[in-house]
Image (spheres, grey):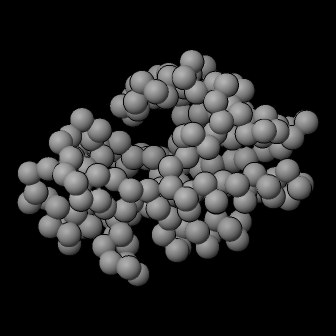
């Protein structure tokens, strides 16, 4: 399997039953927590790993549609690391007995100056900032989202000694475009 494709499968009860052979290498490259090692993922509910109420709802709806036989098109999303923007597509495919295969394919990536906000090892304040789980934009006001670098500047986060904690949400654009998929 290509290093640019990550695959996992869930059963009809939404328990992760398998992950692709390259899972660990991808996790290491993205500085994922050790809790996301294959042995700590397989056998667990997918809902333990999806953060934010909006994202859980979105995935529940996508899985429901696929299980009802409504096919899904590629869903664009981002999976950024501190020093790289990654543009991916998500594919959700129905398998026999209500199982689902979820594939993520990297379409392109762009190097960037490291963003401390995305570094899991950076010191955190008690403040929260909301990051769209799909496009990785930061919520800068109730109705406005901005690219990470712009959002950090608008919120004056670059000037802080500690980075805020991340809260995962879903911007209206990503919600609408995914639900209309």
Q: Quadrant of residue 127?
A: bottom left
Residue 50 spot, x, y in % from top left? 55, 46
Q: Is residue 47 left or right of residue 28?
A: right
Name the spot of residue 30 as percent of width and height, x first: 39, 34
- Report x, y in % for residue 59: 66, 54
Vertical side of 23 occupied by 145: above or below: below
Point out the image quarter for the C terminus.
bottom right
What is the x, y in percent for residue 132?
44, 61
* Front residue (pair 93, 110): 93
Q: Residue furthest bottom?
A: 143
Occupied quadrant, residue 70: bottom right
Residue at left offset 59%, top offset 33%: 6
Q: Is residue 42 above or below residue 146?
A: above
Q: Can residue 25 be seen in the rendering of this structure? A: yes
- Count of numbered tags: 0
On screen, residue 76 above or below 111: below
Q: Looking at this rendering, what residue extends furthest in the front direction?
A: 126
């Amino acid at each position: 399997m290509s290093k640019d494709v990550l695959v996992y499968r869930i059963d009809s009860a939404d328990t992760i039953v398998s992950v692709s052979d390259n899972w660990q290498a991808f996790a290491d490259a993205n500085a994922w927590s050790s809790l996301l090692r294959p042995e700590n993922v397989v056998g667990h509910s997918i809902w333990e790993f999806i953060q934010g109420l909006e994202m859980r709802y979105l995935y529940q709806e996508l899985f429901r549609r696929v299980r009802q036989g409504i096919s899904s098109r590629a869903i664009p999303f981002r999976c950024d690391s501190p020093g790289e923007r990654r543009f991916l597509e998500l594919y959700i495919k129905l398998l026999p007995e209500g199982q689902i295969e979820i594939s993520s394919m990297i379409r392109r990536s762009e190097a960037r100056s490291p963003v401390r906000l995305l570094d899991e090892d950076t010191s955190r304040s008690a403040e929260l900032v909301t990051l769209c789980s799909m496009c990785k934009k930061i919520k800068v006001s109730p109705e406005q989202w901005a690219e990470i670098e712009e959002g950090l500047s608008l919120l004056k986060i670059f000037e802080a000694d500690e980075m805020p904690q991340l809260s995962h949400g879903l911007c209206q654009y990503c919600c609408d475009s995914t639900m209309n998929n």
